[in-house]
Image: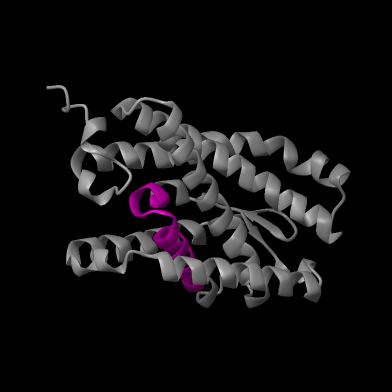
Amino acid sequence: MTIDGALFNPAALWAINILFALALLGAVRMAPWRKFRDTEQLHVFLGTVVALLVLWRMGAPVQLGLSFHLLGVTAITLMFGWSLAVIAASLALLGVTLNGGGGWDGFALNALVCGVVPITLTQILLILIRWYLPKHFFIYVLVNGFLTAGFVGAATGYLAAGLLVASGAYTFAELNQTVLPFFPLMFLPEAILNGWLLAVLVAFKPQWVYSFSDEQSPLASA
């Protein structure tokens, strides 16, 4: 989701800018920069940023001030962890904005909605799933990848709609007649994209996925 920052008053945008700045600062401080001493990991990270930029550039307007695009951040969070995922999303959004894909007034807003919030949700769900469910390849792909991504995608859509209502740009009744009925449909494409990507990565390049362990490999019991 991409929201037009012009729909929000300056005070709200300043508060959002501060929240994003704190999140980004925390991500930069906690990021495992030593990971990039391995040039392969650095190239994977930079390639992921470019892929995310392209994905986010392919948006479609669904309402004045609101555009839809796939997020893809669940897979990135599972690949790199919370901090590097936030940095990757911020860099991708920077590229989109420089390329004319959005205004600077809504940069921090969209970084939170499309990056920080869904990445944080993914990280929380990863911890809960690890705690309550057994470590298994199919659980990792289907629950961490497929179901988590679908839930995060739909939740992000409702968050964006809630922010538009809070800004006064639309009423709940207006959005309920136009875009809200379609938000559950966002579950499937987001789930398929992330689930398929993770299935391929853990099968052929498990070293690229930080959250995947050998205990979850289908070959672990062989």
Q: Position of residue 23 (x, y in %)?
A: 55, 66
36 with respect to 81 (left or right): left
83 with respect to 7 (left or right): left
Q: Position of residue 144 (x, y in %)?
A: 42, 36
As displayed, is residue 75 above or below residue 88?
above
Give the total number of marks visible in the rendering.
0
As displayed, is residue 136 above or below residue 58?
above
Q: Which residue is the extreme one toward the top?
A: 222
| Prevailing secondary structure class for the magenta stretch in the rendered image | helix
Quadrant of the image for the N terminus?
bottom right
Q: Position of residue 72 (x, y in %)?
A: 46, 49
Colour setup of the view: one colour
Q: Residue at x 39, y 37 (%)?
A: 195
Nearer to us in this view, 54 or 106:
106
Q: Position of residue 60 (x, y in %)?
A: 60, 54
Query: In the rendered image, which quarter is residue 47 located in?
Result: bottom left
Q: Which residue is the extreme one toward the left?
A: 222
118 with respect to 220 (left or right): right
Q: Residue at x 47, y 61 (%)?
A: 86
Residue 121 visible in rendering: yes
Query: In the rendered image, which quarter is residue 114 located in?
Result: bottom right
Q: Residue at x 65, y 73 (%)?
A: 18
Residue 93 visible in rendering: no
Quadrant of the image for the C terminus?
top left
Q: Which residue is the extreme one toward the front?
A: 131
Is 82 inside the magenta-drawn segment?
A: yes
As displayed, is residue 134 above or below residue 120?
above
Q: Residue at x 73, y 43 (%)?
A: 179
57 with respect to 216 (left or right): right
Is 21 inside the magenta-drawn segment?
A: no
Nearer to us in this view, 171 or 141:
141
Region in magenta:
76-95
